[in-house]
């Protein structure tokens, strides 16, 4: 087993996720092993919690953790790996270990754009995000996001529809993704991109994990596009990470009537650049990536016809058209269970998120998945990106 990897796992487990100390020691001593073997190790000012973990985290336990990850096919990146992104090394607290599935795209050789936003996004926000990430992917840029419902999922769906490359960062161990994220989207990302986490296998999500995770989304990017955001939100924290990491910040124009506009307005006041297509972003990186071609400007406001073909929630006109078309067809007669029939009463022609459906119905996530799947098989509902559902 790679002894250097064991040392990095030890450093990550002792100092904690998101700590800057492992990289500081690496830069000072040239390797974690040299620090461990130096006289300075015994004199190092460990915090009390770190002292406890030093006693607990033996080399054998590090080997067990690595073996657990390898057993489920995970791969590893550490700061001394040739494939470790330079852009991540530049942030103040690079991750000591990254666990991943798939292939890390060449984020240091082409523009990489992080796309973040509200989970409870508007229909227009989701479609606009997908159109722009579709343009970014077609141009050859890499899109980085978090795969959550709402804007994140819309961003990944736009990339997938273009056959492009994206990276998704998660706030938990990669072995715990099942059931939390759409399987189709995860497999789609894996075709040309990667699922990545700083958290070791078996580590379930906690609230503070999002803050730790979000610095990596912005860190692996040249710039961050904020699609929709409330003023007090994790999205705004990512934008702050971007500013601290000297990343550019971009925004989509939004309606001031929406609650999600407040964060965008504050970003604009702070100097974020408003954009209406991928070219508005990519033009900023012509000198940095001279071989990268900037596509022709295609403002998303001109792409209503394209929007109809996108997988994310579609504009209201297209919804009405689908509704009218479906009215001409005979309704399916597949018998439904009583709870599936009940679920129909909470759905309409406009997509509704899993969380909203849970609030309305009082059902658990597992129950909603079961009955929406039953309705989908009966051709009664349509599933959209971000775990959204509407009558078919």
Image (cartoon, rainbow, N blue to C red):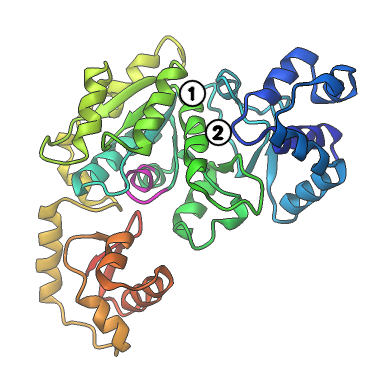
Measured along the vertical axis of the image, is residue 334 above or below residue 96?
below
Measured along the vertical axis of the image, is residue 243 above or below residue 369?
above
Instruction: Indicate whether residue 150 is drawn in magenta.
Output: yes
Which residue is rendered at x = 11% and y = 61% of the image?
Answer: 321
Residue 110: numbered disc:
1
Can you name the residue that lies furthest to the front here? Answer: 48
Nearer the observer, 266 or 383: 266
Q: Secondary structure at mark 2?
A: loop
Residue 127: quarter of image: top left
Left or right of residue 165, residue 359 in this image? left
Which residue is rendered at x = 32% and y = 88% of the image?
Answer: 337
Task: Answer few, some or many: residues within 10 Å of disc 1's Cα (few below 14, many 20 plus, some between 14 and 19).
Answer: some
Which residue is rendered at x = 70% and y = 25% of the image?
Answer: 22
Left or right of residue 172, residue 136 in this image? left
Measuring from the top left, give residue 292's x and y in whole percent. 43, 19
Part of the protein shown in magenta:
148-155
Residue 281: quarter of image: top left
Task: Measure the C-alpha gap from mark 2 to mark 1.
Answer: 9 Å
Instruction: Indicate whether residue 144 is drawn in magenta.
Output: no
- Of the two numbered discs 2 and 1 on the same chain, state the one appearing first in sequence: 2
Nearer the observer, 56 or 168: 56
Q: Which of the image's four quarters has the C terminus?
A: bottom left
Residue 150: numbered disc:
none
Residue 105: numbered disc:
2
Q: Main secondary structure of the magenta part?
A: helix
Residue 352 visible from this viewpoint: yes
Residue 295 visible from this viewpoint: no
Measuring from the top left, give residue 109's x and y in whole percent. 53, 21
Residue contact between numbered discs 2 and 1, judged by CB atoms under 8 Å? yes
Measuring from the top left, give residue 323's x and y in whole percent. 13, 66
């Amino acid at each position: 087993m790679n002894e250097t990897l064991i040392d990095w796992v030890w450093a990550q487990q002792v100092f904690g996720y998101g700590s800057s100390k492992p990289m500081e020691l690496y830069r000072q001593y040239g390797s974690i092993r040299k620090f461990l073997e130096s006289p300075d190790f015994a004199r190092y000012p460990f915090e009390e919690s770190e002292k406890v973990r030093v006693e607990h985290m033996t080399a054998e336990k590090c080997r067990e953790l690595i073996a657990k990850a390898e057993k489920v096919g995970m791969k590893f990146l550490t700061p001394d790996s040739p494939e470790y992104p330079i852009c991540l090394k530049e942030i103040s607290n690079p991750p000591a270990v990254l666990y991943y599935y798939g292939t890390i795209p060449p984020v240091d050789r082409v523009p990489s754009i992080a796309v973040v936003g509200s989970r409870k996004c508007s229909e227009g926000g989701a479609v606009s995000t997908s159109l722009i990430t579709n343009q970014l992917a077609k141009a050859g840029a890499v899109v980085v996001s978090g795969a959550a419902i709402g804007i994140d999922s819309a961003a990944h769906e736009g990339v997938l529809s273009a056959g492009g490359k994206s990276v998704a960062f998660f706030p938990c161990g990669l072995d715990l993704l099942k059931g939390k994220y759409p399987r189709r989207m995860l497999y789609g990302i894996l075709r040309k991109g990667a699922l990545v986490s700083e958290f070791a296998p078996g580590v379930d999500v906690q609230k503070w994990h999002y803050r730790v995770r979000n610095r990596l989304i912005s860190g692996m990017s040249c710039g961050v596009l904020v699609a929709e955001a409330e003023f007090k939100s994790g999205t705004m924290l990512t934008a702050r990470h971007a500013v601290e990491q000297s990343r550019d910040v971009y925004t989509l124009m939004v309606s001031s009537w929406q609650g999600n506009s407040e964060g965008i307005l504050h970003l604009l006041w702070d100097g974020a650049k408003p954009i209406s297509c991928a070219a508005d972003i990519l033009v900023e990186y012509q000198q940095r990536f001279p071989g990268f071609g900037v596509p022709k400007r295609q403002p998303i406001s001109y792409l209503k016809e394209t929007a109809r073909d996108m997988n994310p929630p579609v504009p209201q006109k297209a919804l009405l058209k689908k509704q009218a078309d479906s009215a001409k067809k005979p309704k399916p007669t597949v018998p439904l269970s009583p709870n599936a029939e009940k679920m129909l009463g909470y759905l309409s022609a406009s997509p509704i998120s899993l969380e909203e459906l849970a609030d309305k119905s009082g059902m658990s996530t597992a129950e909603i998945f079961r009955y929406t799947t039953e309705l989908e098989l009966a051709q009664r509902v349509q599933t959209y990106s971000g775990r959204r559902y509407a009558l078919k």
